[in-house]
Amino acid sequence: MKDLIDSYLSWLKQKINYKEINGYYEITTPFVNHINDYIQFYLRRDEKDHIYMTDDGETLNNLEMAGVDINSPARKKELDSILNGFGVRLKENELITVATPATFPMRKHNFLQAIMAVDDLFIVASPKVEQYFIEDVTNFLQQNNIRFSPNIILQGKSSFQHKFDFLIPSSSKAPERIIKAVSSPKKQNIIAHLFAFEDTKQARNNEGIMILNDLERDVAPEVLQAIEEYGISDFSWKNRDKLLEKLVA
């Protein structure tokens, strides 16, 4: 297996663009949010050599414009959990974090992961369905008496932290399983998930599972091929009953 960590970091470095705007650097990443815009954030360096990062409120503002009530108790609790896990703070509507030159690579990675996790948390699986995809998967696990821990932050071999939607502990029949419920399995974003799985596997020797939302459209063949190449188990949400054997062990 090729070294996914090195290839991911090299790819990300090549794909990220930046330009200076009024003392800030606008960072444009290769990842897209739920409205298919490239995710952007902004950073500046102050006189004490601190590096200040902000999304300028775009992540939560986009969700509010889509009609998402981010102030409901359940969603606010999930939002706080994500931000705390990645060391990101909420200032009014902005996601912010501060780094030093030494901590910048990890802080930048965690900040981007937080933005993506917040955006993904509030994606509606279908306009006709009120529940979010992650809630649907949670209900499925509970209804089938699957033991799991939700919203897990794990540290990989690279020392970067990664968020997983569920963790099923190891048993006498199966290793620890980490799960991402991918509500929008697009080519642009899948490489970040693969990096998270591979980096964590090298540190914990666990098994990765992706549950792919294919209710609205089929998952692209190149996405499925990439997942298979790195030894991740992928499951169609339309055919989710086939997943049970993998989870109950």
Image (cartoon, grey):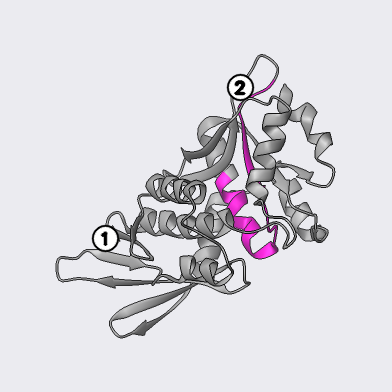
* Residue 61, x across and y down, in percent: 47, 70
Quadrant housing residue 120: bottom right
Q: Secondary structure at mark 1?
A: loop
Q: How far apart are labels 1 and 2 at the CA level? A: 38 Å
Q: Is residue 155 visible?
A: no
Magenta stretch: residue 160 in it?
no
Quadrant housing residue 191: bottom right
Residue 101 marker: 1
Callout 2: few (<14), some (14-19), or many (20+) C-alpha neighbours within 10 Å? few
> In the rendered view of the protein, which quadrant contains the N terminus?
top right
The residue at which mark 2 appears reads as 170
- Region rendered in magenta: 174-196
The numbered mark, 1 or 2, whose residue comes first in the sequence reads 1
Q: Nearer the viewer, mark 1 or mark 2?
A: 2
Relative to 110, say whether 48 is above or below: below
Callout 1: few (<14), some (14-19), or many (20+) C-alpha neighbours within 10 Å? few
Residue, x 42% and y 53% (percent of image)? Answer: 110
* Residue 239, x across and y down, in percent: 85, 43
Q: What's the residue type where badge 1 is placed? A: Pro
Residue, x 63% and y 39% (percent of image)? Answer: 179
* Residue 113, x across and y down, in percent: 48, 55
Front residue of 109 and 76: 76
Front residue of 85 and 65: 65
> In the rendered view of the protein, which quadrant contains the C terminus?
top right
Relative to 83, say whether 144 is above or below: above
Marks 1 & 2, CB-CB < 8 Å contact = no
Quadrant housing residue 36: bottom right
